[in-house]
Image (cartoon, rainbow, N blue to C red):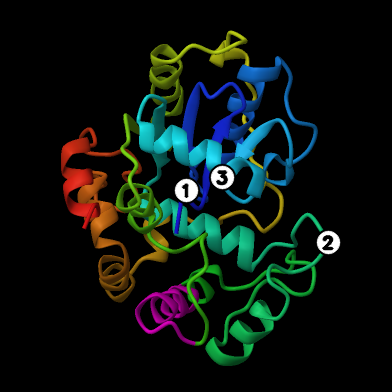
Amino acid sequence: MGFPGTWMTESESVVYRVVPKCACSTIGQVMFYSDHGRFFDGDIHDATQGLHKWAIEASQSRITKAVKGRKVHAFTCVRNPYARILSSFFDKICGIQRNGKRYRGNLVPLLVQKYGIEVGGDDGKQPFDQIKSFRRFLLFTRDTIRFRKPMEPDIHWSAMSGHISTFIVNGGRYNSIFFTEDFNRGMQGVLDAIQTPVKVDLATIPRFNESEGHGPKREHPVSAYFDDLSMHLMWEIYRKDFQLFRYDFDNPDNKMPLGEVDLAEVHAKLGD
């Protein structure tokens, strides 16, 4: 299976396991800058040179050697599951993507037909009941993850622990896992642990939120979207994410983690 979703700098200074909706655009640009002294012109997900990626066949042997040799610092980044699933909904389901089309072609029409979801009209800008539609999307999310129907789960809403585990199961080991909510401290910790061709001053690095502006703005506090049933579904889908990454399940409005990630526990519980 190898190391899907894994990126590495060309200088082999650092390895990163991408977790969608967890600051991956900014992290990729920081990695690119640390080698080249400039940012990639465009969405870093589209880059086919200047950064090793598992999706690029020529990069796979380099990544495999670096990960299995465990001499290159390896890290990933996580995010509050409540905020992450809301972001997925507004960006991927309600938003028009950068190619000017809906995400995954017939996905949104399927959701409208089978789950009665509204998405703000053809352009995603018309008013609609965000709370009702999001809760129906959450039911769809559970169906894809639990039953793999009406489709396989999408990387943007499948559990973070699932993404993170493939790296461990196939022979990798994380040196650090930090929080999107405390990005500068976590990313600085990674930069302090490695040697890069170009020095990175995080304070001057912009945030590359490639999904911003795709969809409607969230109108309500996070907790408004999650009633008892929604929270029950969240626990069913993302229990490991809440437990392993120390996020507050009981209070959706508390975006901050309750403690640091225990790397030994992550490797033990996701390594089987």
User: What numbered label is drawn on residue 175?
Assistant: none
Q: CA distance from mark 1 to mark 3?
A: 18 Å
Read off the residue under disc 2: 100
Mark 1 or 3, nearer chain start: 1
From which residue to which does the magenta span run?
A: 135-149
Given residues 159 and 31, the one toward you in this image is 31
Dots 1, 3 in contact, CB < 8 A: no
Q: CA distance from mark 2 to mark 1?
A: 24 Å
Q: Decide: few, some or many residues near mark 3? Use Cα within 10 Å; few <14, some 14-19, many ≥20.
A: some
Q: Is residue 68 above or below residue 200?
A: below
Dots 2, 3 in contact, CB < 8 A: no
Which residue shows up at 70% across the image and 14% down it? 37
Q: CA distance from mark 2 to mark 3?
A: 31 Å
Q: Amino acid at mark 3?
A: Gln
Read off the residue under disc 1: 19
Q: Amino acid at mark 2?
A: Gly
Please state if 70 lies on the left or on the right of 36 as rendered.
Answer: left
Which residue shows up at 56% across the image and 45% down it? 60
Quarter containing the N terminus: bottom left
- The image shows residue 130 at horizontal and vertical percentages of 55, 68
Q: Is residue 142 located in the magenta-colored stretch of the structure?
A: yes
Q: Residue furthest right?
A: 100
Q: Decide: few, some or many residues near mark 1? Use Cα within 10 Å; few <14, some 14-19, many ≥20.
A: many
Given residues 244 and 263, the one toward you in this image is 263
Read off the residue under disc 3: 60
Mark 2 or 3, nearer chain start: 3
Given residues 272 and 133, the one toward you in this image is 272
Please state if 52 lies on the left or on the right of 168 as rendered.
Answer: right
The kind of secondary structure the magenta stretch mainly shows is: helix
Which residue shows up at 65% across the image and 73% down it? 119
